[in-house]
Image (cartoon, rainbow, N blue to C red):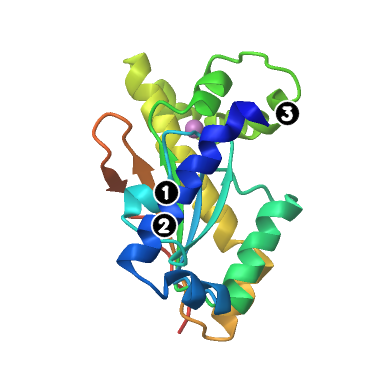
Amino acid sequence: MSTIKHLFENNKQWADSTKAQSPHFFKKLSEQQSPKYLWIGCSDSRVPANELLGMQPGEVFVHRNIANQVIHTDLNCLSVIQYAVEVLKVEEIIVCGHYGCGGVNAAFYDESYGLIDNWLRHIQDVYRFNKAQLDAVTDEGERINLLCELNVIEQVANVCNTPILRSAWLANQSVTVHGLVYSLHDGILKDLNVSVNESK
Ligand code: CO
């Protein structure tokens, strides 16, 4: 316990200063959440969803895993998407990758870290699907950056192909899926311009 004592102190300071700025902040949030956005991002500690979007608690529903993947059979991620779309009625789903992603790097170099190799195998599949395009890039750093982008594009497609999004769009619910990449070097988000909204 003592090793995380400072975290409780930090937390108390944060709660106090938040209350000082907005006295009803916690009361309002404890009653309901109505985020407009679902964020699907990497677990990387340098890519914090709320902070980089300039958003407060209550504004963005978040799912993070290693290398921001949406796997067809991942009940955890699918449950998050279902709850976000069907119950919270989010309007925008953001799949966000980042350059310098350790997961993408490990997949690229076929490094072995145990159990996670299986999870990262999906990124090696992304490489295989786009092999000609990737192999045409001679600079290795640029090729890995492109793999980060293609991974996001693949995950956007995976979100769109879930029965959740298909049903939502059939019911004419307006929800758009976006693909973004974040740069650790300058904190800037890049839009990959692959947004999809198939509601009528
Ligand atoms: Co990452």
Which of the 4 image quarters holds residue 106?
top right
Image height check: is 50 above or below 66? Answer: below
Task: Identify the amino acid type marked 3.
Answer: Asn
Would residue 31 appear left or right of 72 to someone viewing this image?
left
Task: Identify the amino acid type marked 2.
Answer: Asp
The answer to whether mark 1 and mark 3 are in CB contact below 8 A is no
Name the residue at 32% across, 15% down: 139
Crowd around label 1: few <14 · some 14–19 · many ≥20 (10 Å): few
Which of the 4 image quarters holds residue 119?
top right
Q: Position of residue 133 (x, y in %)?
A: 41, 30
**Residue picked out by circle 1:** 13
Q: Is tag 1's residue or tag 3's residue first in the polypeptide sequence?
A: 1
Tell me if the residue at label 2 has its CB under 8 Å from ligand 1: no
Crowd around label 2: few <14 · some 14–19 · many ≥20 (10 Å): few
Name the residue at 28% across, 46% down: 190
Task: Identify the amino acid type marked 1.
Answer: Gln
Q: What secondary structure is found at the residue carrying circle 1?
A: helix
**Residue picked out by circle 3:** 118
Q: Position of residue 140 (x, y in %)?
A: 37, 15
Q: Position of residue 137 (x, y in %)?
A: 34, 22
Location of the C terminus (image quadrant): bottom left
Q: 77 or 171, which is in the foreground?
A: 77
The tag on residue 102 is none
Q: 46 or 110, which is in the foreground?
A: 46
Image height check: is 4 above or below 14? Answer: above
Q: Position of residue 32 (x, y in %)?
A: 55, 78
Name the residue at 61% across, 33% down: 125
Would residue 46 appear left or right of 88 to someone viewing this image?
left
The answer to whether mark 1 and mark 2 are in CB contact below 8 A is yes
Q: 157 or 94, which is in the foreground?
A: 94
Location of the N terminus (image quadrant): top right
